[in-house]
Each structure stands twice: as C-alpha cells, then as structure tokens.
Amino acid sequence: LSRLFGPITQLSGMQELAQTVVVSFSRVFELLDLKPLIRERPDAVDLEKNKAPDIEFENVRFRYPTADEVSLASLEHLRTERERGEVSPDVLRDVSFHVRAGTLTALVGPSGAGKSTITHLVSRLYDPNSGTVRVGGHDLRDLTFESLRDTVGVVSQDAYLFHDTIRENLLYARPTATEEELVEACKGAQIWDLIESLPLGLDTVSGDRGYRMSGGEKQRLAIARLLLKAPSIVVLDEATAHLDSESEAAVQRALKTALRDRTSMVIAHRLSTIREADQILVIDGGGVRESGTHDSLLAAGGLYAELYRTQFANPDRDAPKPELEEAE
Ligand code: ATP
C-alpha cells in the first residue's frame, strides 16, 4: 500500500511548498497518476482579504483516502486483492472547535493523535468525510483555490529549499517582491545578518552544492517566505529537532513577528509557545479531549496536566520537546 500512498505522503510533506509556489495541482496529480482529492466549485467565492479570519471545525469526521480512492486505473496492477476495497480507519472522529480571528491556538497531544491531520484539513489538502471546516464563516469547499492559497500559509518542520539562489527561494513566495521587501522579510525572520555576511548575499546558491543551511537557518528562511506571502492564517509545525540555543532563540523571535495579528494554529513542542497560546487543544484518539489555557488546563488536572508534569515541568527543558509526542 505504501507504494501507492508514497506520492500522497510526499505531497503532504510538500504542503508548504505547494502552497507557497504557484503549482498546477491538476498537472501534478496527472503526472503522479492520481485522482485529484479536492476540486474547486464552479461558483466558488474569494475570501475577504486583509482581515484575519476565524477557523471553525464542526463535527468533523475524517479518514485518509484508500488507494482505491486516489489512484487511477493505470495503477490498478500494483494493488493486491486484499488492498482492493480496503477501508481506512477514521483518524478524526467528531472534532469541533473554534479559533477566534487573530489568536494563537496550540495543538498538543500524543503521537498519532491527529494533530497534523487537523492542519491538513485547514489548508484543504483533503475534505472531511462529514462535518464542516469553516474559515471566515465560509465552508472551505466554497472558496476558490487561489483565495485559499493566499489565505493559508504553512511552515512545516522541514522547509523545502530549491537548489537555487536564496533570492529565488524567497521569490517563490511572492514573485513581485522588491529588493526592499526581500530584505525586510529576512530581517523579520532574523536571517538577514547571515545572508548579508555571505559574499554573494541574496545571490548565494543554497543546497548541497552551494551554501548548506542549518536546520534553524532553513526554518528562518521559511519564515521569511511566510512574511513575504503575508497570509492571514498561519499553520505551523514547530520543529522537534534540537537547534543550538542561539538558533532556537532566533527562530522564536522570528515566529513572534510571523504570527502577529494572524490567526495561527501551531503543533506545539515548546512550552513557551504553549504558554503564550490563547487556546490549547489537547488532541487524543482523533478528538479534542480538552481545551483551555495553560493555567485552566493545569488546574483541571486532566491529560494536559499529566503531559505537562511528565514533559514540561522542568523550566530548564524549555526546548523542542519531541518527548511530548511520544507520551501516552
Ligand atoms: P505526530 O505528532 O506523531 O506527528 P499527529 O498527532 O500529528 O502525530 P497525524 O500525523 O495527524 O498525528 O496522524 C494521525 C493518524 O493518521 C495516524 O494513525 C497516522 O498513521 C495516520 N496518517 C497520517 N497521515 C496519513 C496518510 N497520508 N495516509 C494514511 N494515514 C495517515
């Protein structure tokens, strides 16, 4: 089955890229021999620009599509008898929550709980099987792809960089950006000092055969892309990889700028992010098990309090916390 899911998984991994870059999805799907999972309605509308919208999940149920549902006939021969007609399990069972406009919501919970899946639905990589995801009061299925791409910005753990100059890597986010806008975004993302120190500056080629960016630098470049794109919703998967403390602090500062005045959903691994969140959703078993602020959830003494006690209680450990993801 993984042979068939491979392309889909890769597409999910390229979420940030796909949403940043103008990609013809129908063409990509054609090349991968897959059926498009989402379609734009002929009467789709644009979302109002320049205003951070709210996000609402109402009784959302979702399971990942099976090979039968995604692949075209030409892949048929790759499937075994057992795989034909297979039904995947529900990943989200009955998820309802509301993210107020301009606020930060942190998603926490054990590994495999469904946190990334929730973010995939916000950027409409998939549609729910039942229930509704609304942005600014609109069912996502009623919005144009263009409007959705402009509205939702995704920063994943592994920022994708093309083997090209830093400038080109930034311009993918906004092809019309001026030199000043590029510099401004790099400053906001705390990456300008580094770029300026390189002999070729923005024209430095990044990648294996050029300047190899560290994990923290790549993340900050992804944040610069986000600032250039200026989406009103930010979906962020905080890195679990340990960065050196200087890089870590720079990423944190960059994120503060990037999330200001936007509606944000962060898969959070850092205590500082969780503490600053206006709302924490504790995801477990495909549902929202608890919701509230850090203080209210601690006082409630439930799953969050348990996660906090086992993973976050030591203030010296306010660093990326992959352990939280493994806690059961
Ligand atoms: P983690 O913190 O480990 O990233 P998570 O809470 O983000 O976990 P999800 O990645 O949303 O959890 O996964 C929820 C469930 O959905 C898991 O059982 C996972 O195996 C399954 N899943 C995730 N992506 C896919 C996919 N593309 N196809 C099929 N199943 C998937």
Image (cartoon, rainbow, N blue to C red):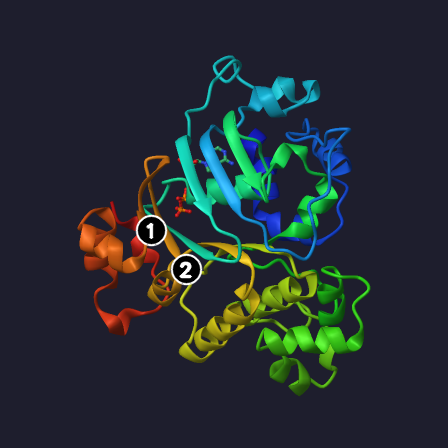
Badge number at residue 325: 1
Asked whether the residues under the numbered discs 1 and 2 touch, taking CB atoms below 8 Å apart as contact, a structural biologist would say: yes
Q: Which mark is residue 240?
A: 2
Mark number displayed over residue 111:
none
- Rendered-image quadrant of the C terminus: top left
Q: Quadrant of residue 79?
A: top right
The image position of residue 47, as x and y in percent, is 69, 45
First in sequence, mark 1 or 2: give its number: 2
Residue 303: image x %, image y %?
23, 47
Residue 229 image position (x, y, % from top left): 69, 60
Is 67 situated above or below 244?
above
Quadrant in which ligand 1 is drawn: top left
Residue at x 68%, y 38% (from the top left corner): 143
Residue 102 in sight here: yes
Q: Residues within 10 Å of mark 2 (few under 14, many from 20)?
A: some
Q: Is residue 53 left or right of residue 283?
A: right
